[in-house]
Amino acid sequence: MRHIIASFILLICAATSYAQGPENVIPVPSDIIITEGTYSFETEPKVSVTFVKKGIAPEGYELTVTPKGVKVKAATEAGAFYARQTLDQMTRDGSVRQIKCCKITDAPRFPYRGLHVDVSRHFRSLDFLTKQVDAMAMFKMNRMHLHLTDAAGWRMQIDAYPRLTSFAAWRPQATWKEWWAGNRHYAEEGTDEANGGYYTKDQMRELVEYAKARHIEIIPEIEMPSHSEEVLAAYPELGCSGEAYKDADFCVGNEAVFEFLETVLAEVMEVFPSEYIHIGGDEAGKQHWKTCEKCQQLMQKEGMKDVDELQSYMIRRIERFVNSKGRRIIGWDEILQGGLAPDATVMSWRGTEGGIEAMTHGHDVIMTPGRYCYLDHTQDAPFLEPESIGGYLPLDSVYVYEPIEASMPADKHHHLLGVQANLWSEYVVTDEHAEYMYWPRAIALAETGWSQPEDKDLKDFRERVLKALEVLKEKGYTTFDLANEYGERKLAQTGLDHKAKGKKVTYIRPIQDWYQAAGEATFTDGVIGGWTYSDNRWQGFLSDIDVVIDLEEVQTVSYIGGTFMQLIGPGVFMPRKVDILVSEDGENYKLVQTVWNDVATSQEELSFKEFHTICNEKARYVRYHAYRSTMRGFLFLDEIVIN
Ligand code: ACM
């Protein structure tokens, strides 16, 4: 429980008004007691550290400020390090020379507080990585997950397989977007067309040491069985087709694949001493396995009934190898498919269901559900933000995430190791842009990972984080300008009252499975959609939308309209046209207006358009028929407004 007790309110107010206290510390500590007086120092605060055997959690600490100096008690070096981070925040790294006397007792809620860095889609400098380690340390994060391999480029020196870095680490296009739009080929290192890069083992060792000194473990990820186009272009014999640029998945039926993966992992484990090795496991298509002779032979031999079991076979075998080196695997939640490897830790990203299932069976879990933890989504109004993969994830939405859910059995809570913020970097070209996407949203997750839920408070956090961003900016970080946040679509914040609100909607075309929002209430609930179609306010259709609203009595209607969005990346288009019809009896309809689309189907930026009519009609029934785009794809509509 956090409580701040002001002991000598009036008398000491004057004396302490220039002194910093622990009020702004992030993550919010478990317990703060403000005591009498202040501590002033000339250049550096005087700090004495003692290590205790009992009574303090492994990463916890006790920090006491008296007029004479600062005393720290901790059980581990990590605890003492975190006490120092708290003190550095209070003194702004020593630039504030007077601090309030207090006693802070603090310890993390979860042992795993992670940040994910995707260096495949765009290669990042080593300086960038160490700089993010510094920021993580400030906020007591302790795991950096390095996504080292993916189709867009292999990023680590592997001595046994030099083509991974002389070829698969380079591509003709500098940006992922251009590369993806092209033929997705690779380039020879040292040629004019080679863009990208890789880390040498020495560079990775340097990063590991740098992070270790800040009590952060670097967890490398080597993707399998999929997201491996770059490997299979460099070593085509490891794919089912045997040809470059044909496969994304390793051929599980080929023993050479295990020799490759074990050799690579052995070299990786030599460089990274982390307890965990991330082996990917996400989004395997598995298509070629169904017709590949080698895969089919293996399935027969092992009595496997489907390709999910083939994936499971691979992950289990790799787990045995990793375990044999004294390490453990983490995989994305798809590793549940076909049966989970016995000791695997699951990183739950497609929602939390996979994590909950794994926990229930006694596996450790790290939560990183896309809805709260994917920092590749836009953090403010899309028209103000750099291009992103889409979606909308403002700071507040990251902050409100609570990892422990009611459906998690209480006796399994200890399997939830913690949380992680992920930044996939398809659209994040520069190091500065990546920083901008992390900070401040990663700070919100840092607090969720460290602080007790009852101590969290959004309003208070926002005030603290504004100050933390000033410090980060002083230190040279590029951050999002939270002070000038625009926020959610205005009508989405307020809702909208109108004549059709609460009125019954009849669906001539039925609601479909994906994106149902509030079901049949959606179009007349007064709830307006936000910046993203996945906010449960937009109803999605892979067909026309054709509905009738019953206003319950004949009345004069002067406005009928609905807003659609277009985001062509995920295949969301404006309707080709909307027919708006009215009827007094529900049988004889009059076409009031056909509203044609005028947003180009090539327009890439997220856009919204109201398809409406301004009219003067007598109507009880209003039919609103939106025709699916010639591009096909989704139609998304949030509300049909009638006035
Ligand atoms: C993932 O986002 N594919 C793990």
Image (spheres, rainbow, N blue to C red):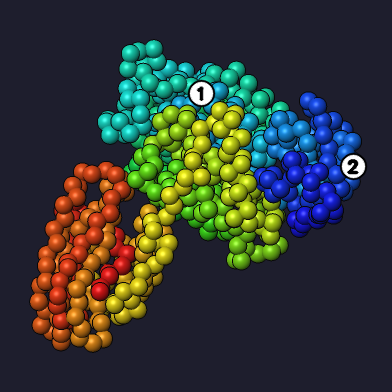
- The residue singled out by tag 1 in the image is 125
Check disc 2 and give the amino acid type. Answer: Lys
Figure quadrant of the C terminus? bottom left
529 or 246, which lies in front? 529
In this orientation, does residue 406 appear?
Answer: yes
83 or 210, which lies in front? 83
Q: How many marks?
A: 2
- Distance between the Cα atoms at labels 1 and 2? 41 Å
Q: Quarter of the image holding residue 49? A: top right
Q: Tag 1, which secondary structure?
A: loop
Q: Residue at the spot x=56%, y=32% of the render?
A: 473
In this orientation, does residue 519 appear?
Answer: no
Mark identifier at residue 6: none
At which x and y percent is residue 161?
A: 48, 20
* 243 w.r.t. 346: above or below: above
At which x and y percent is residue 384?
A: 37, 43
* 586 w.r.t. 312: above or below: below
Q: Residue at the spot x=39%, y=12% of the render?
A: 190
Mark 1 or mark 2: which is in front? 1
Report crowding for label 2: few under 14, some 14 to 19, many 20 or more residues within 10 A (C-alpha). Answer: few
Check disc 1 and give the amino acid type. Answer: Ser
Q: Tag 2, which secondary structure?
A: loop
Report crowding for label 1: few under 14, some 14 to 19, many 20 or more residues within 10 A (C-alpha). Answer: some
At which x and y percent is residue 623?
A: 19, 74
At which x and y percent is residue 507?
A: 25, 75
Apparent side of residue 631 relative to residue 214 in the rendered image (left or right): left
Whether residues under marks 1 and 2 lie with C-beta atoms below 8 angstroms apart, the answer is no
- The residue singled out by tag 2 in the image is 53
Figure quadrant of the N terminus? bottom right
Q: Residue at the spot x=19%, y=47% of the render?
A: 601
Q: Residue at the spot x=71%, y=62% of the render?
A: 411
Note whether ligand 1 is within 8 Å of mark 1: no
